[in-house]
Amino acid sequence: MTDPALYPCFLGPYAENDDLLESLVVGFLRDHAYWRRNLHPEDAPAIPTGANRRPDYIAFESRMRRELHALSAALKRSVPFHSPRYIGHMVSDLLIPGLAAQMLALPYNPNNVTAEAAPVTIDLELKVGLQLAAMVGFVADPARADCAFGHLTSGGTLANVQGLRLALAMKAFPVALRSAAAPIDGLPADDWQAFNLSHAETIALLDRWRAALATMPQHERAHWRSRVEAERVEALGLHAFILRHPALKPPVVFAPSTAHYSWSKGMKLLGLGRDQLRLIPGRAMRLDIDALQAGLDDCLRQRQPVLMAVGVLGSTEFGTIDPVDGIVAARRRMQPQGLDFAIHVDAAWGGYLCTLFRAEDSHLRAIEDIGREFADFPTPAVHSAVAALADVDSITIDPHKLGYLPYGSGAFVCRDQRAVELLTESADYVFSDDGATDFFARHRQIGRYVPEGSKPGANAAAVYVTHRTLPLDHAHFGRLQAQSIRSTEAFAAEAEAFIARNAGRVRACVPFAPDSNLVCLAINPVANGDPLRMNTFIRTLHRRLSADPGKPLQLGEYFGSLTTLKPESLGPVETQRTLECLGFADDALRPGEDDADRVVVLRHTLMHPFLLDDGNGRSYLAGYFEFLDRLLTGLLDEQTRDEQARDG
Ligand SMILES: *Cc1c(COP(=O)(O)O)cnc(C)c1O
């Protein structure tokens, strides 16, 4: 049931590919040593040949070895992400090409803040940006002016922050041009209009501004440049900017109620304030597009500027996919009425699922073609959401999640490279302004755009080599994503059997159909009418599905995670359905009462490539549900004993 194409990809649950990884690591470590040695072989060694016989050398080595052994021993208590028994959080085994490339690059220590410190890996990072751009359907031809641009970040959190930064820069720049009375044609008539220019209009304005500056004499150019700079929100700060433009209130951001908490962090970090983050209720854990439309209508009526609408492609807790096409359509409806906003898709989790939707020539595959391999995937809604990505302004994608790469690699991709100039921090001691026209030459000083400063070039190498080894289309990287979808479908079938065979003792259900490779399972002991009691029951169950750092790892049989369903994300219809299938009264949830206002459920991330392997006479998924059977038996017996003890 495991696609044999995946056999060489991972070190493997049993470290099956240890010889392969070892030969790569040792080979390239030696290669690195020769590189050092061959820089100037005529230089005498700085560390004398006999240094390792000195007492202080030996003492140092002993201390280091002792510490490394202690570390290695301690790390044995790590969570076993590599095992198909681990179906908890969004992490699994690592792809060998990425792991090897990262280890290979590490001793060269490239710093992807500037090409001067990373002559090789900066270009790899820019190429990764183009690879990801092609994967989501953006223009990825560096010869084109409207080519996308992407870069790596430490993770999805910072990529989301970058999305907010870019949106604010784009929205506020036309306002600054107007208020500086920049000498160009076609300036918007008032501040409201300036803030509500479309993405394309702002790009066109930027182009005109650049062209105007280019034709000015040197001193005039300097004058106008600093005059406009002084009016920008980046110079004034949001408070002074709003004071200067009373028609503009602090802008709001719409995001689904399932949005990752990085959005709240980002709003605080940029000084926009968490109050300006408007969470839109959901239906079955997906953004309710009617509620978004109502919110937008309301903003238009009240002349409330909207900075951005966020759609999530693969929510962190539920793997659900928002109607990105609906968000794009809502913007299209609002634009003629004078309200415009940026659209960012948070695909930190689901980004790599797009590989399933890409043909090798990078065209979007038809839903029938994709669906041939699966029972229910993709739903028409999911296909439409992915198809609409080409129309959004920026996207977050985490290589360290469904890209199966080591931590420290998120990515931000924006649709049009011409926008990012607005993010530059002119720190002239680091960067030279050579006005380059070549895509790579122009963007090599990546530190000008990114939130970070120094950043690891080794990560860029890892992502690049992985994307080259497994191109981002359905025939390559997509095989990995396909495996996770097949695992999800198998999981759903196992869950159904579990629900049926345990019907005498628990009421259980999959509370909403998964869009991708995350499945939740709600379980309530029969005859229990109190959600608080159910939630306590699930938390106890979950503790037995967690690695206990105080106990040998081998005592843990399977590893899961837990999340909560809230009525505002589930929506009234799905909430009723879920309560009914769990045997609760319609009004069983008690709003405002801690933990009695929600449904705690088991959450399973089904990304491990070998979940369907039956090394133990049955698949790991079947094994998991058998384990759940046993856990239930133990837990329900304990409860009965406790109750008898209390009563008697
Ligand atoms: C994981 C995740 C994030 C945050 O990404 P980090 O890499 O953990 O910083 C943001 N959004 C979504 C949807 C995520 O799943």
Image (spheres, rainbow, N blue to C red):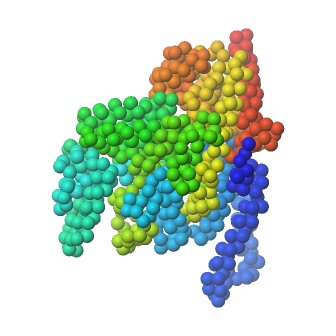
- The residue under the point 48% across, 34% down is 286
Asked whether 198 or 539 is in front, the reply is: 198
Q: Is residue 296 left or right of residue 86?
A: left
Q: Nearer the viewer, residue 153 or 286?
A: 286
Res 522 seen here: yes
Work out which residue is located at the far right of the displayed protein and give it.
617
What residue do we see at 69% from left, 42% from top?
A: 86
Locate residue 48: give its quadrant.
bottom right
- Residue 124 location in percent, x, y? 53, 65
Q: Position of residue 564 (x, y in %)?
A: 55, 30
The picture places residue 468, in percent across and down from the top left corner, at 60, 61
Q: How many marks?
A: 0
Which residue lies at the image location 48% right of the left edge and 40% below the top edge?
A: 384
Report the front residue among 32 and 67: 32
Q: Which quadrant of the figure contains the C terminus?
A: top right
In x, y percent, where is residue 77?
71, 47
Residue 124 vertical placement versus 2 (above, below): below
Who's the residue at 81% across and 40% down the image?
616
Residue 154 appears in the picture as rendered: no
| Above/below status of 136 relative to 206 | above
Quarter of the picture containing the N terminus is top right
In the drawing, does residue 596 fall left or right of residue 75? left
The reply, left or right, for residue 370 in relation to residue 243 is right
Instruction: Kindly give the residue lying farthest to the bottom in the view shown.
Output: 42
